[in-house]
Amino acid sequence: MAIFAGILAPYDYTEKNLQNRLQPPSSDHLFGTDHLGRDILTMVMYGARTSLFVGFVVVCISLAIGVTLGVLAGYYGGWLDEIIMRLTDSFLAFPSMFLALAITAFLGQGLKNMMLALIIVEWTVFARIARGSTLDVKTKGYVRASRWIGASNGYVMIKHVLPNIISPVLIMATLGIGNVILAAAGLSFLGLGVQPSTPEWGAMLDAGRTYVTTAPWLMLFPGLFIMTSVLAFNYFGDGLRDALDQKMKYTELEGRF
Amino acid sequence: MLKAENLHFVYTSGLIKTIKKAAVCGVDLEIFPGETVAIVGESGCGKSTLAKTLVQQLVPASGEVFFGGTKLTGMSWKNLRKFMGKIQLIPQNPDDVVDPKWTVERSVAEPFVICRGFSKEEILVNVDALFAEVGLSAEHKPRYPHELSGGELQRVVIARALALKPDLLVCDEATSMLDVSVQAFIVTMLKDIQKKRGLGLVFITHDLEVAKAVSDRVLVMYAGEIVEEGKDVFDRPLHPYTRALLDAVQYASLEVVLPEEGRALPDGFTGCSYCRLCRERTDACKEPQKLRDVSGRLVRCWKSK
Protein backbone atom coordinates (compact mmCIF):
# COMPACT_ATOMS: atom_id res chain seq x y z
CA MET A 1 0.00 0.00 0.00
CA ALA A 2 2.84 2.33 0.87
CA ILE A 3 4.58 1.61 -2.42
CA PHE A 4 1.53 2.10 -4.61
CA ALA A 5 0.21 5.13 -2.75
CA GLY A 6 0.65 7.21 -5.88
CA ILE A 7 -1.72 4.98 -7.85
CA LEU A 8 -4.14 3.88 -5.17
CA ALA A 9 -4.74 7.17 -3.47
CA PRO A 10 -8.00 8.74 -4.58
CA TYR A 11 -6.75 12.31 -4.22
CA ASP A 12 -3.55 14.31 -4.21
CA TYR A 13 -2.32 14.83 -0.68
CA THR A 14 -1.55 18.47 -1.32
CA GLU A 15 -4.99 19.08 -2.71
CA LYS A 16 -6.71 21.37 -0.28
CA ASN A 17 -10.36 22.02 -0.46
CA LEU A 18 -11.40 24.37 2.28
CA GLN A 19 -15.07 23.94 1.47
CA ASN A 20 -14.80 20.25 2.24
CA ARG A 21 -12.94 20.65 5.52
CA LEU A 22 -13.69 18.35 8.44
CA GLN A 23 -16.01 16.11 6.44
CA PRO A 24 -16.99 12.90 8.22
CA PRO A 25 -16.23 9.62 6.42
CA SER A 26 -18.42 9.25 3.34
CA SER A 27 -18.35 7.54 -0.04
CA ASP A 28 -16.39 10.48 -1.47
CA HIS A 29 -13.85 10.59 1.35
CA LEU A 30 -13.73 7.12 2.92
CA PHE A 31 -11.83 8.29 6.00
CA GLY A 32 -13.17 11.83 5.94
CA THR A 33 -11.20 15.04 5.48
CA ASP A 34 -9.04 17.13 7.76
CA HIS A 35 -9.12 20.76 8.80
CA LEU A 36 -7.66 21.84 5.43
CA GLY A 37 -10.02 19.68 3.42
CA ARG A 38 -7.41 17.05 2.56
CA ASP A 39 -8.49 13.45 2.13
CA ILE A 40 -7.43 11.40 5.16
CA LEU A 41 -7.25 8.11 3.26
CA THR A 42 -4.77 9.65 0.84
CA MET A 43 -2.75 11.11 3.65
CA VAL A 44 -2.68 7.83 5.56
CA MET A 45 -1.40 6.08 2.41
CA TYR A 46 1.35 8.59 1.81
CA GLY A 47 2.04 8.67 5.51
CA ALA A 48 2.70 4.94 5.40
CA ARG A 49 5.53 5.71 3.01
CA THR A 50 7.20 8.10 5.41
CA SER A 51 6.65 5.94 8.47
CA LEU A 52 7.81 2.67 6.92
CA PHE A 53 10.77 4.40 5.27
CA VAL A 54 11.83 5.88 8.60
CA GLY A 55 11.31 2.51 10.30
CA PHE A 56 13.33 0.50 7.78
CA VAL A 57 16.19 2.93 7.29
CA VAL A 58 16.65 3.64 10.97
CA VAL A 59 16.60 -0.04 11.88
CA CYS A 60 18.94 -1.06 9.02
CA ILE A 61 21.54 1.55 9.87
CA SER A 62 21.40 0.96 13.61
CA LEU A 63 21.53 -2.80 12.99
CA ALA A 64 24.68 -2.42 10.92
CA ILE A 65 26.35 -0.19 13.53
CA GLY A 66 25.14 -2.18 16.52
CA VAL A 67 25.98 -5.62 15.15
CA THR A 68 29.45 -4.60 14.00
CA LEU A 69 30.34 -3.09 17.36
CA GLY A 70 28.63 -5.86 19.31
CA VAL A 71 30.41 -8.67 17.45
CA LEU A 72 33.78 -6.94 17.76
CA ALA A 73 33.23 -6.37 21.47
CA GLY A 74 32.05 -9.89 22.13
CA TYR A 75 34.66 -11.61 20.00
CA TYR A 76 37.78 -9.80 21.09
CA GLY A 77 36.73 -9.03 24.65
CA GLY A 78 39.22 -7.24 26.88
CA TRP A 79 39.64 -3.49 26.63
CA LEU A 80 37.79 -3.21 23.31
CA ASP A 81 34.77 -4.84 24.90
CA GLU A 82 35.03 -2.48 27.87
CA ILE A 83 35.14 0.64 25.70
CA ILE A 84 32.29 -0.37 23.39
CA MET A 85 30.05 -1.67 26.12
CA ARG A 86 30.55 1.30 28.47
CA LEU A 87 29.61 3.52 25.53
CA THR A 88 26.51 1.43 24.94
CA ASP A 89 25.66 1.50 28.61
CA SER A 90 25.94 5.25 28.77
CA PHE A 91 23.50 5.54 25.87
CA LEU A 92 21.18 3.03 27.48
CA ALA A 93 21.27 4.96 30.75
CA PHE A 94 19.13 7.72 29.21
CA PRO A 95 15.44 7.12 28.73
CA SER A 96 15.34 6.54 24.97
CA MET A 97 12.48 8.91 24.13
CA PHE A 98 14.04 11.65 26.19
CA LEU A 99 17.38 11.21 24.48
CA ALA A 100 15.77 11.31 21.03
CA LEU A 101 13.88 14.42 22.05
CA ALA A 102 17.02 16.10 23.29
CA ILE A 103 18.93 15.25 20.13
CA THR A 104 16.21 16.48 17.77
CA ALA A 105 15.80 19.59 19.85
CA PHE A 106 19.54 20.15 19.59
CA LEU A 107 19.84 19.36 15.87
CA GLY A 108 16.65 21.07 14.91
CA GLN A 109 13.42 19.88 13.39
CA GLY A 110 13.36 17.76 10.25
CA LEU A 111 13.09 14.23 8.95
CA LYS A 112 16.84 13.62 8.67
CA ASN A 113 17.59 14.88 12.16
CA MET A 114 14.78 12.82 13.59
CA MET A 115 16.15 9.69 11.91
CA LEU A 116 19.63 10.44 13.16
CA ALA A 117 18.29 10.80 16.69
CA LEU A 118 16.44 7.50 16.42
CA ILE A 119 19.56 5.74 15.12
CA ILE A 120 21.57 7.04 18.07
CA VAL A 121 18.92 5.62 20.36
CA GLU A 122 18.36 2.31 18.57
CA TRP A 123 21.84 0.91 17.86
CA THR A 124 22.56 0.14 21.50
CA VAL A 125 19.90 -2.57 21.55
CA PHE A 126 21.54 -4.37 18.65
CA ALA A 127 25.02 -3.97 20.10
CA ARG A 128 23.86 -5.58 23.35
CA ILE A 129 22.18 -8.53 21.69
CA ALA A 130 25.00 -9.08 19.20
CA ARG A 131 27.58 -9.02 21.96
CA GLY A 132 25.66 -11.41 24.15
CA SER A 133 25.12 -13.91 21.37
CA THR A 134 28.72 -13.59 20.22
CA LEU A 135 29.98 -14.40 23.71
CA ASP A 136 27.93 -17.57 23.53
CA VAL A 137 28.96 -18.54 20.00
CA LYS A 138 32.63 -17.74 20.66
CA THR A 139 32.99 -20.64 23.07
CA LYS A 140 31.57 -23.14 20.58
CA GLY A 141 33.77 -25.84 19.16
CA TYR A 142 33.33 -24.81 15.55
CA VAL A 143 34.88 -21.43 16.20
CA ARG A 144 37.90 -23.04 17.85
CA ALA A 145 38.00 -25.75 15.21
CA SER A 146 38.23 -23.35 12.31
CA ARG A 147 40.76 -21.24 14.16
CA TRP A 148 42.72 -24.43 14.61
CA ILE A 149 42.91 -25.07 10.89
CA GLY A 150 44.30 -21.60 10.48
CA ALA A 151 41.31 -19.33 9.94
CA SER A 152 41.75 -15.64 10.66
CA ASN A 153 39.62 -13.80 13.21
CA GLY A 154 37.85 -11.87 10.48
CA TYR A 155 36.94 -15.06 8.65
CA VAL A 156 35.55 -16.63 11.80
CA MET A 157 33.52 -13.55 12.65
CA ILE A 158 31.93 -13.28 9.22
CA LYS A 159 31.46 -16.96 8.38
CA HIS A 160 30.69 -18.49 11.75
CA VAL A 161 29.76 -15.88 14.31
CA LEU A 162 27.49 -13.74 12.13
CA PRO A 163 25.25 -16.51 10.75
CA ASN A 164 24.82 -17.91 14.22
CA ILE A 165 23.86 -14.68 15.94
CA ILE A 166 21.77 -13.23 13.15
CA SER A 167 18.41 -14.78 13.98
CA PRO A 168 17.94 -13.13 17.40
CA VAL A 169 19.22 -9.90 15.87
CA LEU A 170 16.76 -10.06 12.96
CA ILE A 171 13.89 -10.78 15.30
CA MET A 172 14.88 -7.74 17.34
CA ALA A 173 15.07 -5.76 14.12
CA THR A 174 11.48 -6.49 13.11
CA LEU A 175 10.32 -5.59 16.59
CA GLY A 176 12.56 -2.54 16.32
CA ILE A 177 10.80 -1.34 13.16
CA GLY A 178 7.53 -1.19 15.06
CA ASN A 179 9.29 0.61 17.87
CA VAL A 180 10.84 3.15 15.56
CA ILE A 181 7.54 3.83 13.77
CA LEU A 182 6.01 4.49 17.16
CA ALA A 183 8.89 6.70 18.28
CA ALA A 184 8.88 8.59 14.98
CA ALA A 185 5.15 9.15 15.28
CA GLY A 186 5.72 10.32 18.83
CA LEU A 187 8.39 12.79 17.83
CA SER A 188 6.30 14.07 14.95
CA PHE A 189 3.35 14.39 17.28
CA LEU A 190 5.48 16.64 19.45
CA GLY A 191 6.33 18.66 16.37
CA LEU A 192 9.97 17.57 16.14
CA GLY A 193 9.70 15.32 13.11
CA VAL A 194 8.71 16.03 9.55
CA GLN A 195 7.60 19.34 8.09
CA PRO A 196 3.89 19.89 8.71
CA SER A 197 3.06 19.69 4.99
CA THR A 198 4.44 16.14 4.57
CA PRO A 199 1.95 13.48 5.51
CA GLU A 200 3.16 11.42 8.45
CA TRP A 201 1.04 9.47 10.89
CA GLY A 202 2.37 11.12 14.00
CA ALA A 203 2.09 14.61 12.53
CA MET A 204 -1.46 13.84 11.46
CA LEU A 205 -2.32 12.85 15.00
CA ASP A 206 -0.91 16.15 16.17
CA ALA A 207 -2.89 18.12 13.61
CA GLY A 208 -6.09 16.30 14.51
CA ARG A 209 -5.65 16.87 18.22
CA THR A 210 -7.58 20.14 18.32
CA TYR A 211 -10.56 18.64 16.53
CA VAL A 212 -10.74 15.41 18.49
CA THR A 213 -14.20 16.14 19.95
CA THR A 214 -15.77 17.41 16.76
CA ALA A 215 -14.00 15.31 14.12
CA PRO A 216 -12.54 12.16 15.78
CA TRP A 217 -11.72 10.52 12.43
CA LEU A 218 -8.78 12.92 12.11
CA MET A 219 -6.98 11.05 14.87
CA LEU A 220 -8.72 7.69 14.63
CA PHE A 221 -7.39 6.56 11.27
CA PRO A 222 -3.70 7.49 11.57
CA GLY A 223 -3.74 6.04 15.10
CA LEU A 224 -5.33 2.83 13.87
CA PHE A 225 -2.67 2.48 11.19
CA ILE A 226 0.19 3.05 13.61
CA MET A 227 -1.24 0.34 15.82
CA THR A 228 -1.80 -2.20 13.05
CA SER A 229 1.62 -1.71 11.48
CA VAL A 230 3.41 -2.04 14.82
CA LEU A 231 1.35 -5.14 15.55
CA ALA A 232 2.09 -6.52 12.10
CA PHE A 233 5.83 -6.12 12.58
CA ASN A 234 5.64 -7.83 15.95
CA TYR A 235 3.83 -10.79 14.43
CA PHE A 236 6.30 -10.78 11.58
CA GLY A 237 9.12 -11.00 14.13
CA ASP A 238 7.45 -14.00 15.72
CA GLY A 239 7.00 -15.69 12.37
CA LEU A 240 10.57 -14.95 11.41
CA ARG A 241 11.83 -16.63 14.55
CA ASP A 242 9.98 -19.82 13.70
CA ALA A 243 11.20 -19.69 10.12
CA LEU A 244 14.84 -19.08 11.03
CA ASP A 245 15.06 -21.85 13.57
CA GLN A 246 15.90 -24.87 11.44
CA LYS A 247 15.73 -27.25 14.32
CA MET A 248 12.26 -26.34 15.46
CA LYS A 249 10.62 -27.88 12.43
CA TYR A 250 11.91 -31.26 13.40
CA THR A 251 11.29 -31.36 17.10
CA GLU A 252 8.76 -33.85 18.26
CA LEU A 253 7.38 -31.41 20.78
CA GLU A 254 6.06 -29.06 18.17
CA GLY A 255 2.31 -29.03 18.21
CA ARG A 256 2.06 -30.57 21.64
CA PHE A 257 2.39 -27.38 23.59
CA MET B 1 57.18 -37.28 15.78
CA LEU B 2 55.42 -35.46 18.60
CA LYS B 3 57.39 -34.99 21.72
CA ALA B 4 56.45 -33.28 24.97
CA GLU B 5 58.97 -32.39 27.64
CA ASN B 6 58.09 -31.63 31.23
CA LEU B 7 54.69 -30.25 30.31
CA HIS B 8 52.77 -28.32 32.95
CA PHE B 9 49.35 -26.75 32.79
CA VAL B 10 47.61 -24.85 35.57
CA TYR B 11 44.00 -23.68 35.58
CA THR B 12 43.43 -20.45 37.47
CA SER B 13 40.08 -19.09 38.52
CA GLY B 14 38.73 -16.46 40.85
CA LEU B 15 39.37 -12.76 40.87
CA ILE B 16 40.31 -11.84 44.42
CA LYS B 17 41.26 -15.18 45.82
CA THR B 18 42.98 -16.96 42.99
CA ILE B 19 42.48 -20.68 42.95
CA LYS B 20 45.06 -22.64 41.08
CA LYS B 21 44.59 -26.18 39.99
CA ALA B 22 47.41 -28.00 38.32
CA ALA B 23 45.90 -30.24 35.67
CA VAL B 24 49.05 -31.48 34.01
CA CYS B 25 52.21 -31.79 36.09
CA GLY B 26 55.42 -32.60 34.32
CA VAL B 27 54.37 -34.92 31.53
CA ASP B 28 57.03 -36.31 29.22
CA LEU B 29 55.87 -38.28 26.25
CA GLU B 30 56.80 -39.13 22.73
CA ILE B 31 54.63 -40.41 19.92
CA PHE B 32 56.20 -42.13 16.95
CA PRO B 33 54.83 -42.12 13.40
CA GLY B 34 52.17 -44.76 12.76
CA GLU B 35 51.84 -45.63 16.41
CA THR B 36 48.67 -45.78 18.50
CA VAL B 37 49.01 -44.53 22.02
CA ALA B 38 46.18 -44.71 24.52
CA ILE B 39 46.07 -42.34 27.44
CA VAL B 40 43.79 -43.63 30.17
CA GLY B 41 42.85 -42.42 33.60
CA GLU B 42 39.85 -41.42 35.66
CA SER B 43 37.83 -38.30 35.03
CA GLY B 44 39.62 -35.14 36.12
CA CYS B 45 43.10 -36.59 35.87
CA GLY B 46 44.14 -34.18 33.14
CA LYS B 47 43.73 -36.29 30.01
CA SER B 48 41.79 -33.73 28.02
CA THR B 49 43.96 -30.86 29.19
CA LEU B 50 47.00 -32.81 28.10
CA ALA B 51 45.40 -33.35 24.68
CA LYS B 52 44.65 -29.66 24.26
CA THR B 53 48.14 -28.68 25.35
CA LEU B 54 49.64 -31.17 22.91
CA VAL B 55 47.79 -29.63 19.97
CA GLN B 56 48.54 -26.12 21.24
CA GLN B 57 44.93 -25.17 21.86
CA LEU B 58 46.04 -24.45 25.40
CA VAL B 59 49.32 -22.77 26.13
CA PRO B 60 51.25 -24.79 28.72
CA ALA B 61 52.49 -23.05 31.87
CA SER B 62 55.90 -24.54 31.28
CA GLY B 63 57.51 -27.27 29.27
CA GLU B 64 57.92 -27.79 25.56
CA VAL B 65 56.14 -29.55 22.72
CA PHE B 66 58.12 -30.53 19.65
CA PHE B 67 56.69 -31.66 16.36
CA GLY B 68 59.15 -33.38 14.05
CA GLY B 69 61.99 -31.51 15.74
CA THR B 70 60.33 -28.08 15.59
CA LYS B 71 59.40 -26.44 18.84
CA LEU B 72 55.71 -25.54 18.80
CA THR B 73 55.43 -23.94 22.21
CA GLY B 74 56.02 -20.21 22.16
CA MET B 75 55.54 -20.08 18.40
CA SER B 76 53.53 -17.18 16.98
CA TRP B 77 50.09 -17.81 15.51
CA LYS B 78 51.36 -17.15 12.00
CA ASN B 79 54.12 -19.74 12.20
CA LEU B 80 51.88 -22.18 14.00
CA ARG B 81 49.39 -22.10 11.13
CA LYS B 82 51.71 -24.25 9.02
CA PHE B 83 51.57 -27.05 11.56
CA MET B 84 47.88 -26.88 12.32
CA GLY B 85 46.77 -29.22 9.59
CA LYS B 86 49.37 -31.75 10.64
CA ILE B 87 48.06 -32.31 14.15
CA GLN B 88 44.33 -32.53 14.49
CA LEU B 89 42.19 -32.91 17.57
CA ILE B 90 38.93 -34.84 17.45
CA PRO B 91 36.97 -33.70 20.45
CA GLN B 92 34.42 -35.50 22.54
CA ASN B 93 31.29 -33.76 21.38
CA PRO B 94 30.87 -33.87 17.60
CA ASP B 95 27.87 -31.54 17.35
CA ASP B 96 29.89 -28.76 18.89
CA VAL B 97 32.59 -28.83 16.22
CA VAL B 98 30.48 -28.35 13.12
CA ASP B 99 28.65 -25.10 12.55
CA PRO B 100 24.91 -25.77 12.96
CA LYS B 101 24.12 -23.30 10.17
CA TRP B 102 26.39 -25.00 7.63
CA THR B 103 25.75 -28.14 5.64
CA VAL B 104 28.18 -30.87 6.62
CA GLU B 105 29.65 -30.78 3.12
CA ARG B 106 30.60 -27.16 3.61
CA SER B 107 32.10 -28.00 7.00
CA VAL B 108 34.28 -30.70 5.51
CA ALA B 109 35.31 -28.39 2.67
CA GLU B 110 36.21 -25.60 5.08
CA PRO B 111 39.83 -26.62 5.70
CA PHE B 112 40.51 -26.43 1.97
CA VAL B 113 38.88 -23.03 1.73
CA ILE B 114 40.87 -21.68 4.66
CA CYS B 115 44.18 -23.01 3.40
CA ARG B 116 43.57 -21.54 -0.07
CA GLY B 117 45.36 -22.80 -3.13
CA PHE B 118 42.60 -25.28 -3.97
CA SER B 119 40.34 -24.82 -6.97
CA LYS B 120 36.62 -25.48 -6.69
CA GLU B 121 36.90 -28.77 -8.59
CA GLU B 122 39.79 -29.93 -6.41
CA ILE B 123 37.80 -29.19 -3.29
CA LEU B 124 34.81 -31.16 -4.61
CA VAL B 125 36.97 -34.15 -5.49
CA ASN B 126 38.73 -34.05 -2.13
CA VAL B 127 35.48 -33.75 -0.18
CA ASP B 128 34.01 -36.69 -2.12
CA ALA B 129 37.05 -38.78 -1.31
CA LEU B 130 36.88 -37.85 2.36
CA PHE B 131 33.19 -38.73 2.60
CA ALA B 132 33.92 -42.09 1.01
CA GLU B 133 36.85 -42.66 3.34
CA VAL B 134 34.74 -42.31 6.46
CA GLY B 135 31.91 -44.35 4.95
CA LEU B 136 29.35 -41.62 4.40
CA SER B 137 27.30 -41.51 1.23
CA ALA B 138 26.54 -38.56 -1.03
CA GLU B 139 23.08 -38.19 0.45
CA HIS B 140 24.59 -37.04 3.74
CA LYS B 141 26.37 -34.14 2.13
CA PRO B 142 23.64 -31.51 1.85
CA ARG B 143 22.36 -32.20 5.35
CA TYR B 144 22.68 -30.01 8.39
CA PRO B 145 24.35 -31.33 11.57
CA HIS B 146 21.05 -31.76 13.43
CA GLU B 147 19.84 -34.04 10.65
CA LEU B 148 22.60 -36.57 11.27
CA SER B 149 22.99 -39.13 14.02
CA GLY B 150 25.82 -38.89 16.53
CA GLY B 151 27.88 -41.56 14.78
CA GLU B 152 27.45 -39.97 11.38
CA LEU B 153 28.36 -36.61 12.77
CA GLN B 154 31.49 -37.97 14.42
CA ARG B 155 32.50 -39.35 11.03
CA VAL B 156 31.97 -35.91 9.50
CA VAL B 157 34.28 -34.49 12.16
CA ILE B 158 36.88 -37.16 11.39
CA ALA B 159 36.60 -36.45 7.65
CA ARG B 160 37.17 -32.78 8.37
CA ALA B 161 40.19 -33.53 10.53
CA LEU B 162 41.66 -35.75 7.81
CA ALA B 163 41.25 -33.05 5.16
CA LEU B 164 44.66 -31.49 5.59
CA LYS B 165 46.47 -34.84 5.62
CA PRO B 166 47.50 -34.84 9.26
CA ASP B 167 50.41 -36.85 10.61
CA LEU B 168 48.83 -37.13 14.01
CA LEU B 169 45.25 -37.45 15.19
CA VAL B 170 44.50 -36.80 18.84
CA CYS B 171 41.13 -38.33 19.70
CA ASP B 172 39.92 -36.84 22.93
CA GLU B 173 37.20 -39.24 24.12
CA ALA B 174 36.12 -39.36 20.50
CA THR B 175 33.91 -42.39 20.98
CA SER B 176 32.68 -41.91 24.52
CA MET B 177 29.47 -40.18 23.51
CA LEU B 178 28.44 -42.92 21.12
CA ASP B 179 26.75 -46.21 21.79
CA VAL B 180 28.75 -49.40 21.79
CA SER B 181 28.08 -50.60 18.24
CA VAL B 182 28.89 -47.23 16.72
CA GLN B 183 31.96 -46.98 18.95
CA ALA B 184 33.31 -50.20 17.56
CA PHE B 185 32.62 -49.03 14.02
CA ILE B 186 34.40 -45.70 14.52
CA VAL B 187 37.37 -47.31 16.23
CA THR B 188 37.85 -49.89 13.45
CA MET B 189 37.45 -47.17 10.87
CA LEU B 190 40.10 -45.04 12.57
CA LYS B 191 42.45 -48.01 12.69
CA ASP B 192 41.88 -48.68 8.97
CA ILE B 193 42.54 -45.06 8.10
CA GLN B 194 45.65 -45.17 10.24
CA LYS B 195 46.93 -48.23 8.38
CA LYS B 196 46.25 -46.63 5.01
CA ARG B 197 47.71 -43.26 5.80
CA GLY B 198 50.32 -44.26 8.34
CA LEU B 199 49.38 -41.59 10.80
CA GLY B 200 49.95 -41.50 14.52
CA LEU B 201 46.95 -41.85 16.78
CA VAL B 202 46.57 -40.68 20.34
CA PHE B 203 43.51 -42.21 21.93
CA ILE B 204 42.41 -40.46 25.06
CA THR B 205 39.75 -42.47 26.80
CA HIS B 206 38.38 -43.64 30.10
CA ASP B 207 37.15 -46.76 28.38
CA LEU B 208 39.80 -49.34 29.18
CA GLU B 209 38.35 -51.86 26.73
CA VAL B 210 38.76 -49.47 23.83
CA ALA B 211 42.24 -48.57 25.01
CA LYS B 212 43.22 -52.21 25.23
CA ALA B 213 41.80 -53.00 21.80
CA VAL B 214 43.45 -50.25 19.81
CA SER B 215 46.69 -49.28 21.44
CA ASP B 216 50.29 -50.24 20.85
CA ARG B 217 51.27 -48.45 24.01
CA VAL B 218 49.34 -47.27 27.06
CA LEU B 219 49.95 -44.30 29.32
CA VAL B 220 48.14 -44.27 32.65
CA MET B 221 47.55 -40.83 34.11
CA TYR B 222 46.76 -39.91 37.68
CA ALA B 223 46.49 -36.36 39.07
CA GLY B 224 48.22 -34.84 36.06
CA GLU B 225 51.14 -37.26 36.10
CA ILE B 226 51.91 -40.29 34.06
CA VAL B 227 52.12 -43.07 36.60
CA GLU B 228 52.71 -45.97 34.27
CA GLU B 229 53.69 -46.41 30.68
CA GLY B 230 54.21 -49.56 28.67
CA LYS B 231 52.97 -52.05 26.13
CA ASP B 232 51.19 -54.65 28.25
CA VAL B 233 49.99 -52.45 31.07
CA PHE B 234 46.56 -54.06 31.29
CA ASP B 235 47.87 -57.60 31.42
CA ARG B 236 50.51 -56.91 33.99
CA PRO B 237 49.74 -53.69 35.93
CA LEU B 238 52.63 -52.63 38.16
CA HIS B 239 51.53 -49.34 39.67
CA PRO B 240 48.98 -49.63 42.50
CA TYR B 241 46.78 -47.05 40.78
CA THR B 242 46.64 -48.98 37.53
CA ARG B 243 45.62 -52.04 39.49
CA ALA B 244 42.92 -50.06 41.29
CA LEU B 245 41.71 -48.68 37.96
CA LEU B 246 41.40 -52.15 36.49
CA ASP B 247 39.66 -53.32 39.65
CA ALA B 248 37.29 -50.39 39.44
CA VAL B 249 36.08 -51.64 36.10
CA GLN B 250 35.59 -55.11 37.44
CA TYR B 251 34.37 -54.59 40.97
CA ALA B 252 33.49 -50.88 41.09
CA SER B 253 36.09 -50.46 43.80
CA LEU B 254 35.49 -47.63 46.21
CA GLU B 255 38.99 -46.30 46.17
CA VAL B 256 38.79 -44.96 42.66
CA VAL B 257 35.29 -43.63 43.08
CA LEU B 258 36.24 -41.70 46.21
CA PRO B 259 35.42 -37.98 46.00
CA GLU B 260 38.03 -35.30 45.52
CA GLU B 261 38.30 -34.24 49.21
CA GLY B 262 39.27 -37.66 50.41
CA ARG B 263 42.36 -37.69 48.28
CA ALA B 264 43.50 -34.07 48.68
CA LEU B 265 47.17 -33.84 49.50
CA PRO B 266 48.63 -31.26 51.90
CA ASP B 267 50.17 -28.16 50.33
CA GLY B 268 53.77 -28.56 49.38
CA PHE B 269 53.58 -32.33 49.44
CA THR B 270 56.03 -33.70 46.93
CA GLY B 271 55.62 -37.39 47.43
CA CYS B 272 53.58 -39.87 45.46
CA SER B 273 50.28 -38.23 44.52
CA TYR B 274 48.43 -41.52 44.92
CA CYS B 275 49.73 -42.30 48.40
CA ARG B 276 46.59 -41.10 50.19
CA LEU B 277 44.53 -43.81 48.58
CA CYS B 278 47.17 -46.43 48.04
CA ARG B 279 46.69 -49.63 50.02
CA GLU B 280 50.37 -50.40 49.97
CA ARG B 281 51.65 -47.02 51.18
CA THR B 282 54.60 -46.71 53.53
CA ASP B 283 56.68 -43.77 54.77
CA ALA B 284 58.87 -44.07 51.71
CA CYS B 285 55.91 -42.88 49.58
CA LYS B 286 56.41 -39.36 50.97
CA GLU B 287 59.56 -39.11 48.89
CA PRO B 288 59.18 -37.71 45.36
CA GLN B 289 58.55 -40.53 42.90
CA LYS B 290 60.23 -40.68 39.53
CA LEU B 291 59.28 -42.74 36.52
CA ARG B 292 61.52 -45.78 36.78
CA ASP B 293 62.28 -48.26 34.09
CA VAL B 294 61.13 -51.66 35.33
CA SER B 295 61.96 -54.24 32.66
CA GLY B 296 60.76 -52.16 29.74
CA ARG B 297 57.94 -50.51 31.65
CA LEU B 298 57.97 -47.02 33.11
CA VAL B 299 56.39 -46.91 36.56
CA ARG B 300 56.12 -44.07 39.04
CA CYS B 301 56.29 -46.21 42.18
CA TRP B 302 59.34 -47.18 44.18
CA LYS B 303 57.88 -50.57 45.08
CA SER B 304 57.46 -52.02 41.64
CA LYS B 305 60.10 -54.47 40.55
Image (spheres, grey):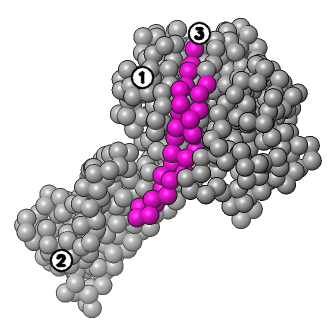
Q: Is residue B162 above or below residue B229?
A: above
Q: Chain of mark 1?
A: B
For the residues labelled 3 and 1, the Cα–Cα distance comes to: 27 Å
Front tag of 3 and 2: 3
Decide: few, some or many residues near mark 1? Use Cα within 10 Å; few <14, some 14-19, many ≥20: some
For the residues labelled 3 and 2, the Cα–Cα distance comes to: 65 Å
Front tag of 2 and 1: 1
Would you name the residue on which mark 1 appears?
B80
Amino acid, disc 1? Leu
For the residues labelled 2 and 1, the Cα–Cα distance comes to: 61 Å
User: Which quarter of the picture shows residue A194?
Assistant: bottom left
Our reading of the magenta stretch's main secondary structure is strand
**In-front residue for pair B280/A13:** B280
Helix, strand, or loop for circle 3?
Answer: helix
Q: Which residue lies most toward the bottom here?
A: A213
Q: Is residue A157 above or below residue A136?
A: above
Which residue occupies 13% across, 68% down? A104
Q: Is residue B25 magenta?
A: yes
Which residue occupies 22% across, 84% down? A209
Amino acid, disc 3? Val
**In-front residue for pair A8/B226:** B226
Which residue occupies 44% across, 67% down? A231
**Looking at the rendering, in which quadrant would you find the C terminus of chain B?**
top right
Both marks 3 and 2 on one chain: no
In the image, which disc is placed on residue B125?
3
Decide: few, some or many residues near mark 3? Use Cα within 10 Å; few <14, some 14-19, many ≥20: few
Helix, strand, or loop for circle 2?
Answer: loop
Whether residue B74 is visible here, answered yes or no, is yes
Whole-percent x, y for residue B39 in the image: 70, 31
Q: Is residue A183 above or below residue A156?
A: below
Would you name the residue on which mark 2 appears?
A190
Q: Are marks 2 and 1 in contact (CB under 8 Å)?
A: no
